[in-house]
Image (cartoon, rainbow, N blue to C red):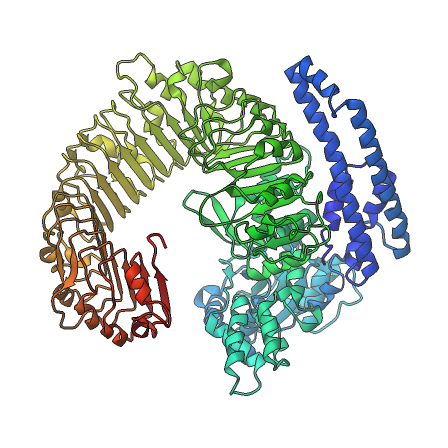
Amino acid sequence: MADALVSALAQTILGNLNSVVVQEIGLVLQDAELKQRKSEAIQNWLTKLKNAAYDADNVLDEIATEGLRRRANSERGMQHQLKSFLSSRNPLLFRSKMAHKVKNVREKLDSIAKERLQFHLSEGVVENRFGVTSESRQTNSLVNESEIYGREEEKEMILKKIVGSGSEQDDLSVYAIWGMGGLGKTTLAKLVYNDARIEKHFELRIWVCVSDDFSTQRLLRAIIQSTGGGGSDISELDPLSCLLQDKLRGRKFLLVLDDVWNEKRNLWDELRQVLGCGSKGSMLMVTTRNEKVAITMATMDPYKIGNLSEDDSWSLFKQRTFKIEEVDENLVAMGKVIVKKCGGVPLAIKALGSLMRFKSDESEWLAIKESEIWHLRDGENCILPALRLSYDNLMPHMRQCFAYCCIFPKDYKMEENELVQLWMANGFIPSEGQTDLHLAGHSIFKELVWRSFLQDVQINSSGKRTCKMHDLMHDLALFVMKHETYILENSEVPEYPKMLRHLGLDLLSSWAIFENENKLKLSMDDSLRSLIVHDEGGIHYGAPQGFLSFLSKQQYLRVLVMNNHTILGLQNLAYKLVHLRNLSMSCSCLKELPESLTCLHNLQTLKLTSTWDLLKLPKRLKVLKNLWFLEMDEFDSLLCTPPGLGDLNCLRRLSVFIVGRDASHQINQLKELNLEGNLSIQGLRNVRSLEDAKSANLMTKRNLTSLSLSWKKGINKNSLECFEEVLEGLQPHENLEKMCISSYQGSRFPNWMSTLAFKHLKEISLEYCERCEHPLPLGKLPSLTRLTLKGMDSVKHLGAEWYGNGERSFPALSSLIISEMRNLEEWNVPDSVESFPCLKYLSIRECPKLTKLPFLPTLKEFSLHTSSVTLLGSIMFLEMLYIKELPIRTLPKVLDNPSTLKTLWLHGCANLESVEEGLQYLTSLEKLVISHCDSITSFPAAILENMSSLISLTFQRCKKLNPLSGPLQSGAVLEHLLISGCPELKHLPESVQKLSCLKELWIWYSKGIRSLPNWLGSLQSLTQLSIRGCPDLAKRCEKTNGEDWLTISHIPFLHILPGEHG
């Protein structure tokens, strides 16, 4: 298993060496991979082969890299070619060196080829890919219901589907259950199959385990055997079909096909045609790990089986493990930790439960608790054999891609684009004809999701698709890669694999190792292919010197990811890492990148983070002909993009392009680039005509999802630049989902922005388009969910033209931001138009002339900033309200329906003195925050008596406030109280002792509080106390010695940080 990747690796790498020896080895690889599990000698042979394959790949890559370097030098002229000839890169010396290396590789391969003969390996494709494993994966219809937990609701739901009133279809109905291996699909199918209602409803019930062999003849024979026997001596399809149809004709049957893997539609159609002879209401139920199989076969909505709850997981584990009711509490505590690691997967829980049943010593339980589940042996019925079945069914290159994901820690959110880029850099994606490598990579990602190897797919706030690996899948991947992958997460001296290829590390946690080179004794001075630093929690400048020394030795490195670290010494390092394909790094504090980066001729991905100070990129970036992805997260400081980017024919992602005046920076550089994802075009003041704008060819870039078009803010309004013509020529493809136009100085928007062609457009931002008086008819866009209007100084009215011609306007809009619209006076909705049916969030900022809002019945969240307070009177049914920097002295009753409000945030209202009047109407308020309101002096505790729903209360940086003053009788349900930055407060308010429900108390940056009252010890509900920035108080709360320690020692969670920043 550990060397199950050899086949894919060797086929990928050795395929580039055209020799008889390589062809001979290739013929026996698949058989060797199957047999290596039972033969240590074959395992060792495969390991030798893998190492030889890596050596061969390194040699081939050196030769290819030299070719790229020479081509780049030839473009720079004779002087550079002569300089190269006189240097250590002399072509004659290089040829001699490579000849010697190639000879060594061939000798290794010759030796390995001869050694294979002693193993008697079969040549060609082996039919049974799974070997012994596939034989062990047989299922039957028998079930012990006493061992099943947490599936009753799912069972009842499926039963209703199968025997319900809508199940009597003329055609054969197919219901599919799918999900990751080990979740209990077969068990759930058995529960349904054996239910009395099923027996009553169907005349005939048949159970067949399909597994990987979806041979129609085999399945027909198996079904016949389940219906009374016969057909064992028949091999032809037609006689088998006739025999089965004779047995099924006119009978209502339920057929369960368990563990189906087949994705080929034609094979399924062939089987279904035979089965279509039963009576009305016959049903087929399928279980599979592959969603694609479920969708292909099902005629009803497939059901994805869920994980067990923690309670059901524990019940199952307890039933398997403990023979008696009374069990040692320590074993129970450790058992619950073990169960949690299983992630609600019944097969894993059963495996561990059966194992722990025969272990009574605490040290044995502790060892299991702290180990990885893949350390268990197959003979002990662990989860790995079941997961191996899924893994073995993958194509070899997919196995590589899946297993590589273990370089990230468990529960790590992996980005789809990043995974594809990493797979490309490592050469895992096969090159087949003209197939675009990164498109093939996305297909692989999709397949791994379909098959449940990757899960929890989401779109994050940046619009990027992310995923996770189930812990058990991560264990499987790590087990597969254990001889070449390691994750370093602390400063303990690790035991590395002998030939480490991929290293993931938390550099901050392991800093001490790299500070002491004597402590860092690594065996992979030139074997490392990937180095991924996955620190979290902020940007870090630099790295320990020992780390840079270690890095400089990794001459065959393909991947270097340091998103949170700035690489010092990058200029010299680039000359040593010429095989690098993927470089991702932080540019914090960097003004420019070194020109030496252009020596990385193999570079496919250059991803730069924290680039807010970056002014320049390398000028000669255009020589990197293999560059696919040039991405930056911030580029406001960037003065220009490198010249000649249009020469990069492979480029697919380009975060920013800044138009310049000279030919190599003009917008026509974008013409031939097949870009996708996000693109920001800046410096559009340098585009002079409609023809120039059209030369960008944006209309043909169908894979762009986000486009930002920016002129320079503050351009002279009387300038002669043809803004309207330019924007007309920058029409994008209609697939666009997000668009931002900034500092456009035309008086109108082009016609293409007023059409319904952009049906996929979800987000629009129009910023500082100061001369446009009339807003676009954006209400016609059917998919628009988020709209921002900012700095549109000439717009005075939002009226009929904004909504477009239709009875329904802004049908999908959920978020609307109107900001810095200083001349906006009216916002009306025509009577005949139904508008904003989905609007949930509205923000109005710096719109001083706007005094009334239209009726917005679905609005739930409203933020009002530096605008008229009268706008609050237009809102009904609000749940969340943010009031920021309004010139109010009191909090009046301003909402039409205050009883629905659950969250109120008052921030920066400098004149606010009192809130009692307005709060008395907010009977449903659950959370109140008063922040940076310097004039408010008191918040009487008695207010809480009328706020029966208030759970969370925050006072933050209110200089004069003395909160919760005066008496409090009872009735408060407050659970969370934060007092921060209140210098006038000298002691914890007496009223706090009446808060019988209080669970969490934070006292921050209120230095006037120097001690805690004795009565705090009587608050038995208090579970958390946090003290920060109160040095005197923190000293009194020191454990054991502090004067207030006994008062707080009963609180389970204490966080005492005396300093200003903790």
Q: Residue at x 48, y 65 (%)?
A: 167
Compared with 681, 839 (above or below) is: below
Task: Between residue 258 and residue 885, name the one nearer to us.
Answer: 885
Task: Between residue 359 and residue 299, name the one nearer to us.
Answer: 359
The x, y position of residue 414, in whole percent, is 52, 49
Task: Between residue 835 and residue 474, name the one nearer to us.
Answer: 474
Q: Toward which corner of the image does residue 1017 lie, by quadrant?
A: bottom left
The x, y position of residue 1036, in whole percent, is 30, 67
Q: Residue at x 26, y 74 (%)?
A: 1019
Q: Is residue 54 left or right of residue 1003?
A: right
Task: Between residue 378 and residue 883, name the one nearer to us.
Answer: 883
The x, y position of residue 802, in whole percent, is 24, 32
The x, y position of residue 713, in whole percent, is 31, 24
Compared with 77, 902 (above or below) is: below
Q: Toward which corner of the image does residue 92 lie, by quadrant?
A: top right
Q: Quadrant of the C terminus?
A: bottom left
